[in-house]
Image: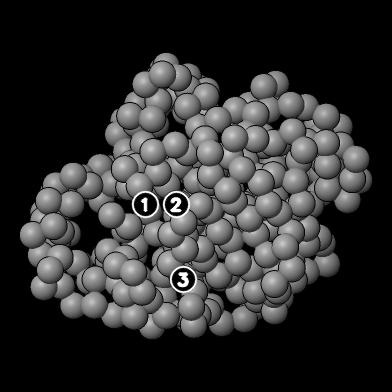
Amino acid sequence: MRWCRFDDSRLGIVDGAFVADVTAALDVLPAYRYPLPAHDVLIANLPAVAARVRAMLPGAPRRPLPSVTLLSPVANPGKLIAAPVNYQKHLDEVKSDSEIHAGNPKHTITIQSAGLFLKATSSLVGPGQGVSVRKPERRTDHEVELAVVIGREASHVPRHEALACVAGYCIGLDITIRGSEDRSFRKSVDTYSVLGPWLVDTDEVPDPGSLDLQITVNGELRQKSNTRCLILGVPALIELASSFYTLYPGDVIFTGTPEGVGPIEPGDLVEARIEAIGAMQVRVRDADATPLAALSGAAADARP
């Protein structure tokens, strides 16, 4: 199934060019009181919700995808984990382009020595909400990435067991302000973590290590690669992350971006695609502009 969250946090299942509204299935979620859990309760209870969804799906009301505003399919991740320079050609690009590395001596560090970094959960949005450029006087870049959503609590996970911890996959945009500051600071701006257009179950993505991905800006192809080019693949990233901290349901791992990163400006239309997941369009706007409503064709189904 392809899970989406739309409009006023309604739950949907993507069915071709339509969204089936299955919000009533959330009734099976446990009730919580303060202190609230530090994980996403939908992802933690996804099997129970899925059973309810299957029963109600045939009669669920449907709406055309272009008529809804797609939010992040994960509402309350405990952590947004990101992998720096995880494609060799991107690492080469960073080393050779002063506008990207901004004189930061850390630009020569590999992912094996740099490790992972965290992004603020407050930076998370869905494709229908768009990206708001916070520092227009500085270069702001797009980075398309495969995003992995963790499905269960996991710590010290060996590589060969890692994929069993995954709930599903999304497209991720890791938007970044170029500069000498720490990565997590420059990449944690509001709206600079875009997740969507929906969460695809693992049974639809049997091999996350062999997926074509690309991004265009105003129709111009900027990045195109395949996840087989990752330096550390999904299992290795889960092994590394879980060796330092416990992973919880709803935690998101942005796996890294290939070469071709480039600037975006207010008014741009960004389209990202990943094989077996789909496509999403994201508008870029000024920081003081009104957040965007749903785009026409914002989440066109792109099954391979």
Asked if the residue under mark 3 is in contact with the one under mark 1, i.e. CB atoms within 8 Å, the reply is: no
Q: CA distance from mark 3 to mark 2?
A: 13 Å
Q: Is any atom of residue 8 visible in this view?
A: no
| Residue 292 x %, y % | 52, 79
- Residue in the image at 34% along x and 42% along y: 202
Label 1 and label 2: CA atoms lie apart by 8 Å
Mark 1 or mark 2: whose residue is earlier in sequence: 1
Residue 158 x/y as whole percent: 42, 16
Residue at (50% x, 52% y) in the render: 275
Task: Give me the residue at 68% from left, 64% from top.
Answer: 216
Secondary structure state at the residue bearing disc 1: strand
Instruction: Tell me where residue 231 sits by quadrant.
Output: top right
Q: Which residue is mark 2?
A: 276
In terms of image quadrants, where is residue 88? top right
Which label is found at residue 300? 3
Q: How many marks?
A: 3
Q: Callout 3: helix, strand or loop? A: loop
Q: Quadrant of the N terminus?
A: bottom left
Spot occupied by residue 209 in the image (x, y as percentages of width and height): 52, 35
Nearer to us in this view, 43 or 135: 43
Looking at marks 3 and 2 on the same chain, the residue that comes earlier in the sequence is marked by 2
Q: How is the image coloured?
A: one colour
CB under 8 Å between callouts 1 and 2?
yes
Image point (45%, 42%), residue name: 148
* The label number, if any, that marks residue 200 in the structure image: 1
Q: Which quadrant of the figure has residue 39?
A: top left
Query: Mark 1 or mark 3: which comes first in sequence?
Result: 1
Above or below 169: residue 75: below
Image position of 182 with respect to 57: above or below: above
Q: Position of residue 233 (x, y in %)?
A: 55, 30
